[in-house]
Image (spheres, rainbow, N blue to C red):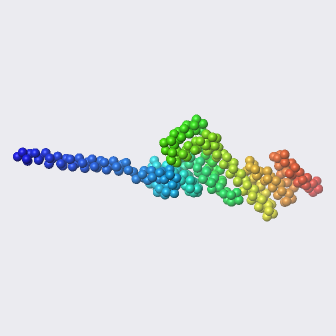
């Protein structure tokens, strides 16, 4: 009787213990499932590759995350990191596409400012030799102007704060690529080479290239003795790129085309306008001006 009574509590205890064990196991498995989000883990691995500057592997991972992170808190992070990886590997057409996608799909993103700037820089990198088609040059100028319009220069106190913040973060994680990039940008801005100043300088350089392109087309037509289209391209330089080094040579070309076409009134007008803009260069057109005036006195 005593043996039977002593066994009863144990028989009742084991099922309860088993139930409790299964419950705890289920809770643990559930917690693991919540903590181990496969998308977050793939993103973390991609960022590890990026921090190690293994951009090719990072790109493969980020490309795989583009659609699974659509309309999620990771969307702008994935797009920005993918575009940055493309830029670092000199795949500028792809970086431009992804930076633009970020701006279109997540316009309120904290990465939007950098995306606009890097979009312009991507097109700047694609800008070809002056004799080739200048579509990307025009795109770069337009995107730099949008950047300057949307993000005017910020105060120096913010820049100093950024330098100090990212300097401290790099002490903790010296291999972190994003911290390094932001620190270098802040340092550049502090030293007077901020993105805004870079954008202004880039616009000026790109406009010189466009003016050179139009001038070279005009010169080509002039060599072929197609003086009318040559004059039209010289006029384009004069009208649109008067702030470039090609303005004065374009005026000289315009005068020459009018003389070669025996357009004496046009030639006289062009010379007189040239002298208004460049009075110190009077000697360059003196002979031509006398020739044109003789044509007026001896029609």
* Residue at the image position 66 percent from the left and 48 percent from the top: 202
* Residue at the image position 8 percent from the left and 47 percent from the top: 4
Question: Is residue 284 rendered to the left or right of residue 49?
Answer: right
User: Hey, which residue is sitting farthest right in the picture?
Assistant: 298
Q: Picture coordinates of residue 111 (x, y %)? A: 53, 46
Q: Picture coordinates of residue 1 (x, y %)? A: 5, 46
Q: Picture coordinates of residue 285 (x, y %)? A: 86, 52
Answer yes or no: is residue 106 visible: no
Which of the two residues, 43 or 232, is positioned nearer the viewer here?
43
Answer yes or no: is residue 264 visible: yes
Question: Is residue 281 rendered to the left or right of residue 164?
Answer: right
User: Hey, which residue is sitting farthest left in the picture?
Assistant: 1
* Residue at the image position 86 percent from the left and 51 percent from the top: 284
* Residue at the image position 6 percent from the left and 45 percent from the top: 2
Question: Is residue 109 rendered to the left or right of residue 195?
Answer: left
Quarter of the image where the C terminus is located: bottom right
Question: Is residue 237 rendered to the left or right of residue 145?
Answer: right
User: Hey, which residue is sitting farthest top in the picture?
Assistant: 157
Would you place residue 97 above or below residue 145 in this image? below
> What count of labels does the image hold?
0
Quarter of the image where one finds residue 183: top right
Q: Picture coordinates of residue 144 (x, y %)? A: 63, 48
């Amino acid at each position: 009787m005593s043996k039977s009574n002593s066994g009863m509590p144990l028989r009742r205890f084991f099922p309860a213990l088993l139930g409790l064990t299964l419950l705890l196991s289920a809770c643990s498995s559930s917690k693991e499932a919540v903590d181990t989000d496969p998308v977050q883990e793939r993103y973390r691995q991609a960022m590890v590759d990026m921090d190690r500057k293994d951009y090719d592997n990072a790109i493969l991972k980020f490309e795989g995350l583009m659609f699974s992170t659509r309309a999620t808190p990771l969307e702008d992070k994935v797009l920005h990191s993918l575009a940055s990886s493309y830029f670092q590997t000199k795949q500028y057409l792809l970086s431009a596409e992804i930076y633009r996608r970020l701006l279109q799909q997540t316009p309120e993103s904290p990465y939007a400012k950098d995306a606009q700037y890097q979009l312009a820089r991507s097109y700047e990198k694609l800008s070809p030799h002056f004799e080739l088609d200048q579509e990307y040059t025009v795109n770069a100028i337009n995107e730099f102007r949008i950047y300057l319009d949307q993000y005017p220069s910020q105060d120096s106190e913010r820049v100093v704060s950024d330098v100090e913040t990212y300097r401290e973060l790099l002490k903790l994680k010296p291999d972190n690529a994003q911290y390094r990039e932001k620190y270098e940008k802040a340092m550049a801005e502090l030293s007077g080479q901020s993105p805004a100043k870079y954008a202004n300088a880039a616009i000026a350089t790109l406009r010189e290239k466009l003016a050179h392109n139009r001038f070279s087309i005009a010169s080509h037509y002039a060599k072929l003795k197609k003086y009318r289209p040559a004059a039209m391209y010289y006029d384009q330089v004069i009208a649109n790129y008067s702030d470039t080094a090609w303005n004065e040579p374009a005026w000289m070309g315009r005068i020459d085309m009018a003389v070669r076409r025996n357009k004496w009134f046009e030639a006289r007008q062009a010379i007189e306008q040239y002298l208004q803009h460049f009075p110190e260069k009077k000697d360059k057109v003196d002979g031509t001006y006398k020739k044109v005036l003789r044509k007026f006195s001896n029609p």
